[in-house]
Image (spheres, coloured by chain):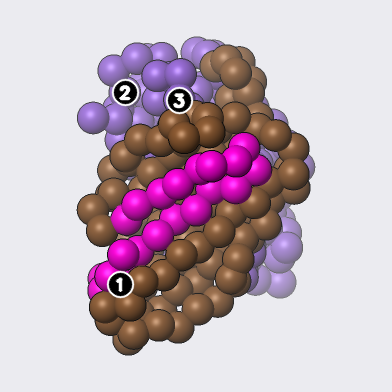
Chain colours: A purple, B brown
Amino acid sequence: GDSVTQMEGPVTLSEEAFLTINCTYTATGYPSLFWYVQYPGEGLQLLLKATKADDKGSNKGFEATYRKETTSFHLEKGSVQVSDSAVYFCALSDGTGFQKLVFGTGTRLLVSP
Amino acid sequence: DAGITQSPRHKVTETGTPVTLRCHQTENHRYMYWYRQDPGHGLRLIHYSYGVKDTDKGEVSDGYSVSRSKTEDFLLTLESATSSQTSVYFCAISTGTSRATDTQYFGPGTRLTVL
């Protein structure tokens, strides 16, 4: 079945450092791809999405490009802030029409001043 | 936040007791989902609904049942709770009807502890 693999965390960075969180996927169809963020004690919030190959999703300085040839959707940000500390989840929508999501295990990001 | 509420927000119960969690939405979306979140597993789909009285199983449905008698409410029931069902439960709705618009929005979660 479909699956999503994320890099293990935690990722520990200093403020203003460059961030990359790797995400690769396995899917039989043509999924949509998502990054969700979960701040401490809260639910998940959509960060960005891409629905077809070569699409770039972006939001709040974060970007990710849908790479069909490498089945990847890596999350990047040029300069992280302490407020970006959270758990980041990569996910795909299986494209069956019921829009079910398959999640990666999550990557915790810790940003220090 | 797509008008999603979950109740209760926290619950502690004992093994063998029935538990029902409620998800309520205010915007009439067709698709609703229940996920559980556990360390090392991310979120996993328990059940989903694509309309009133239309539900189906997800990846980890054993020990859970659901009902949707009204568009706005999606109930998750643990018939006889076990310690392995200690988790954080999230409800979600989908706002789209096509791949181009499929985005899920999540409720605040219910933390369930089974002793």
Of B43 and B74, which appears nearest the observer? B74
Judge whether residue A1 can be spotted in this image: yes
Whether marks 2 and 3 lie on the same chain: yes
Chain letter of the residue carrying label 2: A
In this rendering, the label closer to the viewer, 1 or 3: 1
- Decide which of tag 2 and tag 3 comes sooner along the chain: 2
Badge 2 element: loop
Q: Amino acid at mark 1?
A: Ala
In the displayed orientation, state which residue is furthest to the front. B69
Read off the residue under disc 1: B81
Tell me the residue at 32%/56% (across/down).
B64
Tell me the residue at 74%/37% (across/down).
B27
Of A14 and B62, which appears nearest the observer? B62
Q: Amino acid at mark 2?
A: Ala
Read off the residue under disc 3: A98
In this rendering, the label closer to the viewer, 1 or 2: 1
In this rendering, the label closer to the viewer, 2 or 3: 3
* Left or right of A13 in this view: B62: left
